[in-house]
Image: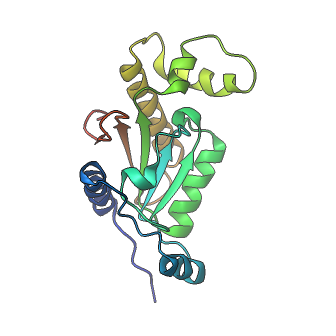
Amino acid sequence: MKEEYVSASLALERLKAGNKNYIDAKKGSSDVSPEIRLETSKNGQKPYAIIISCSDSRVIPEYIFSAGIGELFVVRVAGNVIDNFQLGSIEYAAEHLGCKLVVALGHTQCGAVGSAMKKNSGYVGFITDEIMRAIGEERDPVKASILNVKQSVSKIKNLLKNIQGLQVAGALYHTDSGIVDFDIIF
C-alpha cells in the first residue's frame, strides 16, 4: 500500500495555521505525548515539511508552527546557511520521508547575520563568509536576513531541482512578535 504524503501547498497551510496557534496560545499545543513517541518509534516519522532554521535558541520551529513529534524535519545551523550537509538532509527527507515542502526560515535579530557584517576568523568564518556572499553591502539587519534567506532558497532550488515535486519557500520569523512572515520573502 502506497503511503499518502502531504502536498507542498497543504504543508504550507498547516505551517501558517500552526504559527497562528502559536501566536494566540498561552502554552504549547503540540503533541509530545507518550503515545506519539511510541507511535513514531514503532512506525517511523512522517513529517509534512522540512524546515531549515538558524540554531538561535529563540527560534524553535516545532513551537513556532505548533508541531509535535514526527511532524517537522528540522535542520538547524547558525545563519540558516546551506551547504552539502544541509542539502543531504533535505534530499533525505524529500526522497525517503516524502516531504514536498522546504522552508528556509530566517529571523530578526540574527546573531550570525550581524556577525557576518564584521570580520570573523576560525570556523565561524565559514558561516559568516557564506552570509556575506548573500547580503553583499546591505547593512540593515532585517533586509540582510531576508537576503540571506533568499540565497538559501535559491541554492536549494538550484541544487535539488531534480527532486520531483519539491517546493521551496522562504520565510522570516519575527523574534519579538512570534509571527512568521511568508510574504516578506517573495
The answer to whether 35 is drawn above or below residue 144 in the figure is below
* Residue 167 showing in the rendered view: no
Task: Tell me the colour scheme of the image.
Answer: rainbow
The answer to whether 3 is drawn above or below residue 140 in the figure is below
Whether residue 183 sits left or right of residue 164 in the image: it is left
Asked where in the image residue 159 lies, by quadrant, the reply is top right
Depth order, front residue of 114/90: 114
* Residue 117 showing in the rendered view: yes
Residue name at image x 25 percent, y 38 percent:
183
Where is residue 7 shown, x and y percent of the image? 33, 65
The answer to whether 86 is drawn above or below residue 17 in the figure is above
Q: Quadrant of the C terminus?
A: top left
Where is residue 100 shown, x and y percent of the image? 41, 60
Residue that sits furthest to the front in the current view: 26
Whether residue 1 sits left or right of residue 11 in the image: it is right
Residue that sits furthest to the bottom in the current view: 1
Whether residue 87 sits left or right of residue 31 in the image: it is right
Where is residue 98 shown, x and y percent of the image? 47, 68
How many numbered discs, if any? 0
Residue that sits furthest to the right in the current view: 122
Residue name at image x 56 percent, y 45 percent:
76
The answer to whether 102 is drawn above or below residue 72 in the figure is above
Residue name at image x 43 percent, y 26 percent:
109
Residue name at image x 55 percent, y 26 percent:
112
Where is residue 173 shown, x and y percent of the image? 36, 38
